[in-house]
Amino acid sequence: MGSNKKEYMLCGVFAVIFIVMSVLSPSRFLSLYNLQTMAFQLPEFGIIALGMMVVILTGGINLSITSGSALAGILAAFILSGTVMVGSNVVVAIGAAVALILVSSILIGLLNGFVVAYIGVTPILVTLGSKILYEGISMWLTKGGAISNFPEAYYWFGNESIGPIPVPLVIFAFIAVLTYVLLEKTPWGARAHMVGSNPTAAVFSGINIKRVLMQVYVYSALLAGCAAVIMLSRYNSAKVDLGSSYLLQSVAAVVLGGTNIAGGSGKVFGTVVAVAILQVMSSGLNILGVNRFIIDMITGAILIAVLALNVLSGRRQALRKKGEPFLDQTA
């Protein structure tokens, strides 16, 4: 199935789900409040999903993406909360806090990237270990509590609008366009695709795989840091589990958006549409009174189903190339 056809289908799925939710609860789902809520919630989820996508594109995975985001946010929260207590310059403090989030995110990405690229440890094991590490550091820093009481000016990143458009949505749109340009229009993006599709061929093509992987993990962590900037502002607090619910959802969005879980292929547009689908579905089911645990179960089921369909589709295409009839090997 061509990538364009997949994207058209995703748009169709989004339209169907949006219409169904609108019909089931028109007064609440289509209310201005709910639409605004989704517009403010979607960006942080979408940015983390894009960060997950660039890693999966190279055949890896980043299980520490949300814990790294939370740690960066906690470090910045100390500056923001301290600003209120001592009454220092708000603009300088906000600038320092955002800079700290981005710098700490780069360091987090460098750690993951170095162990994956230069030591050669499997990405799932590296990022699982770093996830536990970051959570432990965050727990030690916060003592299990939350850091809050930020300057009112900081709320702009997650709660204000530029005209009718929420600021988080503007940030998300900018990051989505930037990621599209990097992956689709630059040599770096071509190298990342090749590393994911055929590492051996990438080596013989003169591509420095280690450098590409390092850059990919740093970029993934940077996007997680950008999401942390928004989440800190929206929630006015930082704690160990900040954004933790987006870990499974981000993987589901990336796979649903058409990115091959084994690496090599994937589109930013597909991931963005998949994020919108999951956001609308989650919001709609929540309005209908469906338990949060049931929504998580549905998300997990979607992930398994899409992975299974992708594997079966791959087998079918491989057998068609050989001129053999497709047989369901699961029977």
Image (spheres, grey):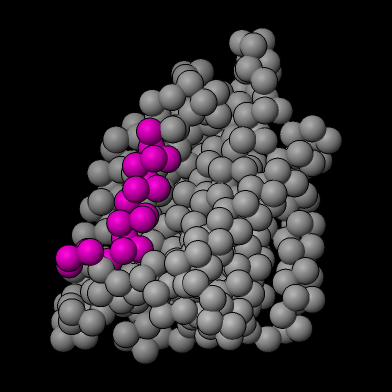
> Which quadrant is the N terminus positioned in?
top left
Percent across and percent down for residue 215 are 61, 35
Percent across and percent down for residue 211 are 67, 28
**Of helix, strand and loop, which mostly describes the magenta segment?**
helix
Residue 111, magenta (yes or no): no
Q: Residue at x 74, y 64 (%)?
A: 134
Q: Residue at x 45, y 55 (%)?
A: 47
Q: Which image quadrant for residue 141?
A: bottom right
Is any atom of residue 308 visible in this view? no
Percent across and percent down for residue 71 are 66, 66
Vertical arrangement, residue 233 with respect to residue 326, above or below: below
Q: Residue furthest bottom?
A: 289
Residue range corresponding to the magenta coloring: 162-181
Percent across and percent down for residue 114 are 76, 39
Q: Residue at x 38, y 26 (%)?
A: 185
Between 263 and 49, the one lying in front of the other is 49
Is any atom of residue 135 visible in this view? yes
Q: Residue at x 74, y 34 (%)?
A: 117
Vertical arrangement, residue 35 with respect to residue 64, above or below: below
Q: Which image quadrant for residue 167?
A: bottom left
Between 184 and 215, the one lying in front of the other is 215
Vertical arrangement, residue 245 with respect to residue 56, above or below: below
Q: How many marks?
A: 0
